Amino acid sequence: MSLISAFRPRSTRETSPQKSRLRLRRGHRRQDHTESEAEGDGDNAHSIITPSKHTPKPLRVLRGSVSAGGPLRPFRLVKQDILNLRRRYVSDWKIFNQLVFASAVYVFFTNLLPGITFASDLYVLTGKSWGAIEVVFSTGLCGIIFSLFSIQPLTILGVTGPFSVLAENIYSLCQEIFNIPFLPFMAWSLIHSAWLHYVLAIINAHDWTMRYVTTFATEIFSLLNSIIYFHKAIQELERAHETLSFAAFLYAVIGAAGTMLLAIFLSTAENWRPLFHRYIRLGLAEYAAAISIILFIGLPHVGELAHLDKMTLPVSHSFRPTSPDRDRFFVEFWKLPIGWIFAAVIPGIIITMLFFFDHEVSSIICTIDRYGTRKPGGFAWDIVLLGTTTALCGILGIPPSNGLLPQAPLHSESLMHTEQEQHTITVDGEEKVENREVRRVYEQRWSAFLHSGAILLFISPPFMTVLGLTPTSVLAGLFLFMGEQSLSVNPILYRTFYLLTPPSELPSLPPSLAKRDSSSTGTDNQPPQSPSYIPIHLYTILQIVITVAIFILTLTRAAPAFPVLIIALVPFRLLVMNRWWPREVLRFVDAWACREGTPEDDEDARANAKTDELRGEGSSGGSGEDGFLSGRDGNAVNIDTASRAARADGHGSNESENDWIELDVRMHTDEEIGRKIS
């Protein structure tokens, strides 16, 4: 096992020549503008006392942040996302092939059936307020809206396990403590969550929240989702044990295990060479989950198994809500007492934190470097859309959908293909062109649109009746398969294997991780210390302990607060863990989740910039000090490095829809301290 499977590698995404030249031109324009301002104002800059010199520094920083080009400038990221959406939209509909269709089928099953399983939980634990038809309606409706209008169509939406846990606890509070109707209170909670989503998008929350999220938190959140899937599978089998005869229960266990194992086995069909033709192996791998599900749905109806009692999905046989007290998909939310309308802000805030973090993490994971995405993406516009669909679901009286894990990255995995790219290399002073195979994902909207449309069809009575034939044991097996698929790509799993591996069998660590002894001198002939795995093992154990603690919390009355703990992992990693672990170890095992580099890299860059400033070396750089320009996500990009990347990259795409439009954050000069602030 290689280290690259357990530790996140450095980004390999190359800077295209066009993008580099764009940054350089933008940097030169900004530098010229700054120099002209300095020349015009230099003579009388301190000849008068301006009111801003007596303004408190916090107010000056706030004023600079919300002014043109500031990081808190309202609608900055929304405007950027809309411009990028216009550039990529047409090309997203031009890609359609067999792999895209197979991906749509795969996501259809892995989205619909787990959602139905959550529906069976919601049916029991929300007093029949929500059932299968509500979950199917929400998944299909929200999925179509996002496939048509979102800026990142690779993200998959559905009713998530964490929200199901949250909704079940809110229902319990409404019935046992508040003594108020559940659906109107939930509707107001979702309406409050909607306007909070709008606020987050307007004030560019992604830039000052998710930019500080590291893989430490995202790996824990992904592991939590995997554990929830495994737990839901066990719950389904527990219900089968309480309801079915012993023989039927034994077959339910066999059906669950068989569904999972067959899906895993078929998903490896591409490695069966020379068995079968290549296209047969490809088809088996692409439709592995669908084949397994269909087989084990039909198997109980064959032979003597047909005489066993079965536990199937509870579904509606007419297009009407599950609750017998409702006759239409509409909630009279305005009839809730005014006090409870304002009280609904509290669960609205919790839902907003959960949805914002969950959806952004889903969007980040399904577009990481391994998928080779090239088209411009974004986050703010999708948060606006998410707020809109959340309010719509609350008014319709159906559970809201948001970004799914692990379906979103599995969607990207199912769209991976091999492309040939030409690279220009220099050998002995001569430029040569060589072909390289690269793995990329098809960036398109058809797979999201087709699978969401197919899901929406199942709100009709004939299709809902077919869905009602599905044994719950198959759903338990699918949950096990989804949990395994999510866990198999989580670095925590591989680092856990390292915990169980003898030290002599572990791969070598980089020498930079060796503990330095400050008492040793350079004249000693002692051999250098070898790096130890102990800090890495402790890091992994901490992640596992935190995940288990949060999962246990979801089983208690305090479950609605678990999104707060997920968010609290961000400052915990940045402010506390760097006191417990060596910096080089954290640099090795952790990284920023949605941008390049690590927190330790940024600390080093700030320390170097401060040193240069004290030495007087940072006064000649214009807006990009010391030859650095502001790059994507606010990282510094060295002009020389960008130029070398532009010369070395000979395969830059000429398609305009693949170019990012970035509305950079400009620095503002504080008149009192005489230097730039963001």
Image: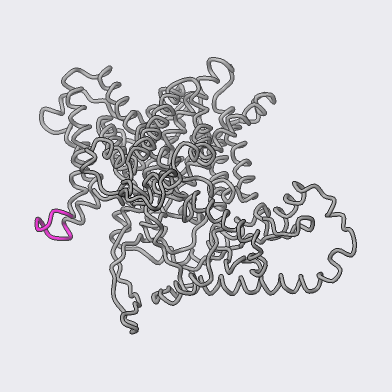
Query: Toward the viewer: 273 or 237?
Result: 273
Tell me: residue 601, above or below residue 391. Answer: below
Percent position of residue 350, x then y: 56, 33
| Residue at 41% in and 34% down | 161
Q: How many labels sit on residues?
A: 0
Name the residue furthest bottom. Answer: 430
In which quadrant of the rendered view does residue 348 lie? top right
Percent position of residue 163, x then y: 47, 33
> Colour scheme in the image?
one colour
Q: Is residue 279 magenta?
A: yes
In which quadrant of the rendered view does residue 190 lie? top right
Q: Main secondary structure of the magenta part?
A: loop
Percent position of residue 338, x then y: 69, 26
* Residue 149 makes an appearance in the image: yes
Tell me: residue 409, above or below residue 355. Answer: below
* Residue 106 makes an appearance in the image: no
| Residue at 36% in and 61% down | 442
Which residues are drawn in magenta?
A: 271-280
Percent position of residue 96, x then y: 35, 63
Query: Toward the viewer: 118 or 155?
Result: 155
Is residue 671 found left or right of 543 in the rendered image? right
Name the residue furthest right. Answer: 48
Name the residue furthest front. Answer: 523
Is residue 607 found left or right of 494 in the rendered image? right
Is residue 537 found left or right of 288 in the rendered image? right
- Quadrant in the picture for the C terminus: bottom right
Query: Toward the viewer: 333 or 527?
Result: 527
Query: Toward the viewer: 369 or 466?
Result: 369
